[in-house]
Image (cartoon, grey):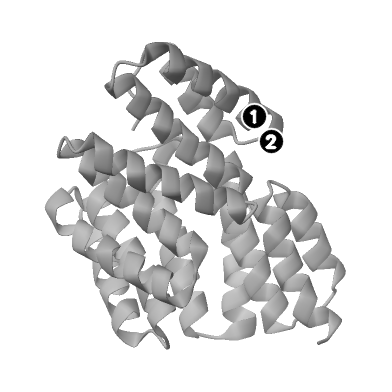
Amino acid sequence: MTLLDEIPDAARELARAGRGMRALRLLDAAGTDDPRIALAAAQVAMELDMRTGTCEAGARVTIAERICGPVWDVRFLRLRFDYFAQLFTGGDFAFGPDGKDPALPAELDQRAGALAADAPDAVRAGWAHMYHGVILDNLVADRAAAPPHYAIALRAGETGRDDPLTWEALRHLGDHDRDAGDLARARERWERATTLAAGSGAVGATLAQQMLLAVLARDTGDEAGSVALAREISRWSAATGAIRLHRQAEAFLAGQAVA
């Protein structure tokens, strides 16, 4: 195994731990047009932007497209980038189709389906289904159509031992359980998702999962427990630069609903 085999995985681990800028500096220091480096840099930048609100991913995805060509992983990255551009319109969460060009969510819906069909393996097909689900949920606002995609993603994550895919699917399936009034099932899924995220060293994802557990505590009448957890999430997210999550935690502590 060479240094260029190790650097991309090390950078991804740094990004999961909330050290996205350090991860990008590590990748840049590799000083190469190697496709593995370009792909990892785009992935790290996407995570960084999502958690902290920076604007690193656009240029990195374009570089990956130039170096790697239209391979599946880069096409999937572009789908993710375009999805987040719609979700974070104006810099914060903007759920649903209101105020957006209706053709854009429809195009993303089509592209996600094509990526699922063209995926080179079951895990990557699961990731395409995962994003197909969130596009339907969060942009198209077709809540009923999303869970089957999450179920496929969950099976792919579990079978392929891909913990990030598994916790993402559990997170979103739990959201639908909560909407259906099955709080026990939502808790089971969300607690398992939190454990998987923590086990993978994903600081931001773990805190985001704990935010949902705080919401669930409030749902079940444990206001003291929900507030105590949200206070810790607020402190940790502020310390790690997870700006969007910090805003959510502060809004929750102020008594507002958290999406």
Task: Label 1: state its secondary structure.
Answer: helix
Q: Which residue is mark 1?
A: 236
Q: Residues within 10 Å of mark 1 (few under 14, many from 20)?
A: some
Q: Residues within 10 Å of mark 2 (few under 14, many from 20)?
A: some
Identified at 68% across, 46% down, the residue is 18
Q: How many marks?
A: 2
Are the residues at dot 1 and dot 2 in contact (C-beta closer than 8 Å)?
yes
Identified at 50% across, 78% down, the residue is 73
Q: Answer with the quarter of the image where residue 166 lies.
A: bottom left
Q: CA distance from mark 1 to mark 2?
A: 6 Å
Q: Is residue 99 visible?
A: no
210 lies above or below 121: above
Quadrant in which the C terminus appears: top left
131 lies above or below 218: below
In the rendered image, residue 144, in percent from the top left (x then y), is placed at 13, 53
Answer left or right for 175 relative to 179. right
**In the rendered structure, which amino acid carries the disc numbered 1?**
Trp
